[in-house]
Amino acid sequence: MTAARKRKKFLIEEAGARLRSVGLRPTRQRLALAHLLGADHRHVTAEMLHEEATSVGIEVSLATIYNTLHQFTDAGLLREVVVDAGRSYFDTNTGAHHHFFCEEDGSLVDIPGETIEVARVPAAPKGMAVERVDVVVRLKRA
Amino acid sequence: MTAARKRKKFLIEEAGARLRSVGLRPTRQRLALAHLLGADHRHVTAEMLHEEATSVGIEVSLATIYNTLHQFTDAGLLREVVVDAGRSYFDTNTGAHHHFFCEEDGSLVDIPGETIEVARVPAAPKGMAVERVDVVVRLKRA
DNA sequence: ATAGCTGCAAATGCTTTGCAAGGCC
DNA sequence: GGCCTTGCAAAGCATTTGCAGCTAT
């Protein structure tokens, strides 16, 4: 086995271990999608990820993409970002941070969590707790 | 004409004038919907408004509700709030303010604009301008 | 009269689901 | 082998659109 193959095998096993650790079987599709989502700071819709997978020669059905995105989200590997009624974006950055969103071209850009300061957030209504605070800075062409 | 009828006529004419001033013909449907949305601080979905109209005996098709909500939004009479992929909420409060949102029951509650302070919002990317900053405080059962 | 509205029904777009076949442990 | 996954196609919502008829001015 060459060094390159060893490295690849290691990566796959590592990814497999991560999936296993969140209770998901490391199937071919999930490994492939996890790999595509590997780079940090990515924002994808199901459709985008499907096209990307297809163009790289990975065969995955759109239904599986949706299932996988939600499983990853439930497992804490992804985070869903709601900026547009009608389309769901998933963010590979699960840490605290916010977003620029441009409605014209549907682009989404991260704003590091420490950058924006949100102060004086009122207490949650009785019986409720704050799950998180999302800030979306909506952009238009200047 | 009784005083009550005079008052009603006045209200309708006033509403009509407001619609005309934003370039919309004061039709029966638009007047009725404008009246239902009259109270400030309301959050409605198309479906909710349709049910409400129907239950009060106003006949309006769902398609017209959608058209009207968007026309009112374009005219600046309403504001669309994106908190849930898949459902659009419209807010009768068009001033600067933010929201509590509870995913479990889909409820939306205003947070006055001055309450929350958002500081250090980064400059918009080149060629873009900030249209507005939305803050959504997501709640879960405590 | 005529430009603009409305309603219906059909179409669209995104997402979810049911179920049989296939893959991981 | 048994149970979890996948894929397909069909179903499900929310929303939009085309078009014929209606209405406000």
Image: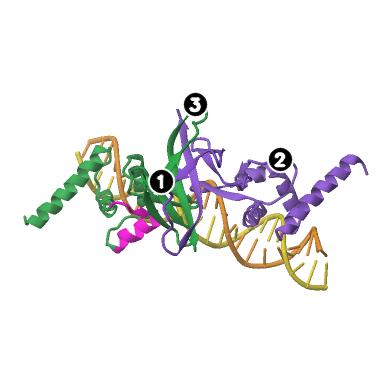
Chain colours: A purple, B green, C orange, D yellow
Question: Subunit of mark 1?
Answer: B
For disc 2, the marked residue is A55
Camera-near label (2 vs 3) is: 3
Measure the alpha-carbon separation of dots 2 and 3. 32 Å
Query: Are the residues under badges 2 and 3 in a single subunit?
Result: no
Q: Is residue B34 magenta?
A: no
For disc 1, the marked residue is B116
Q: Which span of residues is magenta-colored?
A: B40-55
- Judged from the image, the secondary structure of the residue bearing numbered disc 2 is helix
- Judged from the image, the secondary structure of the residue bearing numbered disc 1 is loop
Q: Residues within 10 Å of mark 3 (few under 14, many from 20)?
A: few
Q: Residues within 10 Å of mark 2 (few under 14, many from 20)?
A: few
In the image, what residue type sits under mark 3?
Gly
Q: Nearer the viewer, residue B112 or D8?
A: B112
Q: Nearer the viewer, residue B95 or A51?
A: B95
Checking the image for residue A109, the label placed there is none
- Judged from the image, the secondary structure of the residue bearing numbered disc 3 is loop
For disc 3, the marked residue is B127
Measure the alpha-carbon separation of dots 2 and 1. 45 Å
